[in-house]
Image (cartoon, rainbow, N blue to C red):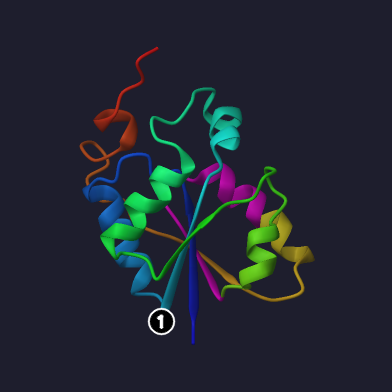
């Protein structure tokens, strides 16, 4: 069984997310999505998510787009969730470039091998969370 893994906040699921997850699913047999912890969202984006981690997990699970929806790591770049699931493929969104760089360095030290695939954008000028759900700051 080929396991595919995705990372994200998924704070309000939109068609861009749906297309990304469908494309990720097509890369393997089992799709696991790790959602970013609330405090990590604040560290990375300098703002809170609109929905809590529990709400985001429930919302994404209810879509049926992933076989498994889990909480991401408690610490940035600890990679514990990856060590636990040992996926064959990590599918990243086109805008996850910082994550791509960090993973590129980290996978050299993993005890298992995996492939990183950057997924194509789906209408990024219309369907990006920052456009659909602008910050209230």
Report the residue at 79% width, 64% height from top.
109
Report the residue at 27% width, 56% height from top.
18
The answer to whether 24 is drawn above or below residue 105 in the figure is below
- Crowding around mark 1 (Cα neighbors within 10 Å: few <14, some 14 to 19, many 20+) is few
Secondary element under disc 1, as helix, strand or loop, is loop
Horizontal arrangement in the rendering, residue 94 relative to residue 64 (left or right): right
Among the 4 quarters of the image, the one containing residue 127: top left
Report the residue at 46% width, 48% height from top.
8
- Is residue 94 at least partly visible in the picture? no
Is residue 94 magenta-colored?
yes
The residue lying toward the viewer, choosing from 56 and 33, is 56
Quadrant where the C terminus is found in the figure? top left
- Is residue 43 at least partly visible in the picture? yes
Horizontal arrangement in the rendering, residue 130 relative to residue 47 (left or right): left
The answer to whether 44 is drawn above or below residue 94 in the figure is above
Is residue 9 magenta-colored?
no
Locate residue 28, reporting x and y percent.
42, 79
For the magenta stretch, what is the residue range?
88-103
The answer to whether 77 is drawn above or below residue 82 in the figure is above
Report the residue at 33% width, 74% height from top.
26
Locate residue 104, reporting x and y percent.
65, 57
Locate residue 132, reporting x and y percent.
25, 32
How many discs mark residues in the rendered view? 1
Work out which residue is located at the far bottom of the displayed protein and give it. Answer: 1
Residue pointed to by mark 1? 29
Locate residue 75, reporting x and y percent.
70, 43
């Amino acid at each position: 069984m080929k396991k595919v893994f995705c990372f994200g906040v998924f704070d309000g699921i939109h068609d861009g997310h749906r297309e990304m997850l469908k494309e990720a699913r097509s890369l393997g047999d089992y799709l696991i999505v790790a959602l970013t912890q609330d405090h990590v969202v604040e560290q990375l984006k300098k703002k809170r998510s609109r929905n809590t981690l529990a709400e985001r997990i429930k919302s994404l699970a209810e879509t049926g787009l992933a076989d498994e929806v889990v909480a991401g790591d408690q610490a940035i770049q600890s990679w514990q969730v990856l060590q636990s699931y040992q996926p064959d493929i990590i599918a990243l969104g086109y805008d996850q470039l910082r994550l791509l760089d960090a993973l590129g360095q980290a996978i050299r030290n993993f005890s298992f091998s995996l492939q990183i695939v950057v997924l194509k954008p789906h209408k990024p000028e219309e369907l990006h969370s920052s456009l659909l759900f602008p910050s209230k700051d």
